[in-house]
Amino acid sequence: MQQSPHESRAICPTKSRRIRQQFLLRLPFLPKERRAAITAFYAFCREIDDVVDEVTDPGVAHSKLAWWRAEVDKSFAGTPTHPVMKALMPQAATYRIEARHLQAVIEGCQMDLSQNRYLDFPGLQRYCHLVAGIVGEVAAQIFGQSDEATTAYAHKLGLAFQLTNIIRDVGEDAMRGRIYLPVNELQQFDVKAHEILKRQYSERFTALMQFQTQRARHLRRSAGHAARSRPQGAKARPHDGQHLPHTAARNCR
């Protein structure tokens, strides 16, 4: 039986329960419309993320992501079928959410199905751009950014927090056979991939992780500095970059 728009909107808060607990409840100042938009957007992100994390058959996962790609195109053409997209589409024009944003999130998550190593930092940076920077960009628009420079800030902060996620989840990712730390940096610190996969940590590994942590911290600080640095005469506005909540620039993973 086809669900009504009211029923479809009700699904998003349920699907994004973790987001409500960790994110939305920290933003009581958000107007109802913005709250609905960020809930629907994060529900979309969780749907895509769950395909990668919960579907064990790579072929099935690829098929599901292909379905989502088509669903995004259909939704922006005016015919959404999934409850999450039905909830998101009424907000899309108001908050400048475009099909390219959603397709980028799908592309980033799809990389986890076909790539579990990155040769260098630029390669990893592109992955972070898709799964975190884009999320930060859309979140900033929903929060009401009034300065276009906020987009660059959101991307830089998204990179910093995604790198932090990678540092935090090294062991958990290794259990899935994924090593996000760049190969050339592992070589630089003489850390072997099998050591990480078997969770055999050494002083060399500690030095590597200190290097990773320092880079993430530097990116976070430089993002904050950029947000505070404005041309002479420019006025800070309530929803500009310096007030973008940290979790907004993190991906949903």
Image (cartoon, helix red, strand yellow):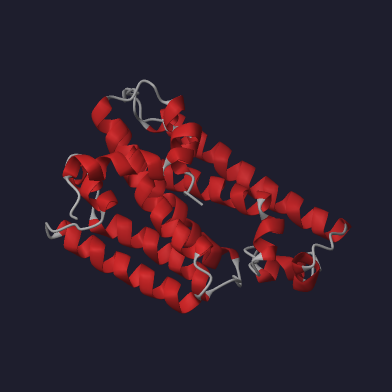
Asked whether 195 or 140 is in front, the reply is: 195
Residue sitting at x 53%, y 70%: 56
Residue sitting at x 81%, y 54%: 207
The picture places residue 15, in percent across and down from the top left corner, at 40, 45
In this rendering, the answer to whether 13 lies above or below 108 is: above
In this rendering, the answer to whether 86 lies above or below 148 is: below
The picture places residue 166, in percent across and down from the top left corner, at 62, 54
Furthest toward the left, the residue is: 78
Furthest toward the bottom, the residue is: 59
The picture places residue 184, in percent across and down from the top left corner, at 68, 70
Q: Quadrant of residue 239?
A: top left
Residue sitting at x 33%, y 25%: 30
Q: Is residue 141 visible?
A: no
Q: Quadrant of the N terminus?
A: bottom left
Q: Is residue 38 visible?
A: yes
Residue sitting at x 21%, y 46%: 92
> In the image, is 86 to the left or to the right of 114?
left
Furthest toward the right, the residue is: 203
Asked whether 141 or 230 is in front, the reply is: 141
The picture places residue 142, in percent across and down from the top left corner, at 29, 37
Q: Quadrant of residue 189?
A: bottom right
Asked whether 64 or 92 is in front, the reply is: 64
Total numbered labels: 0
Q: Quadrant of residue 31?
A: top left
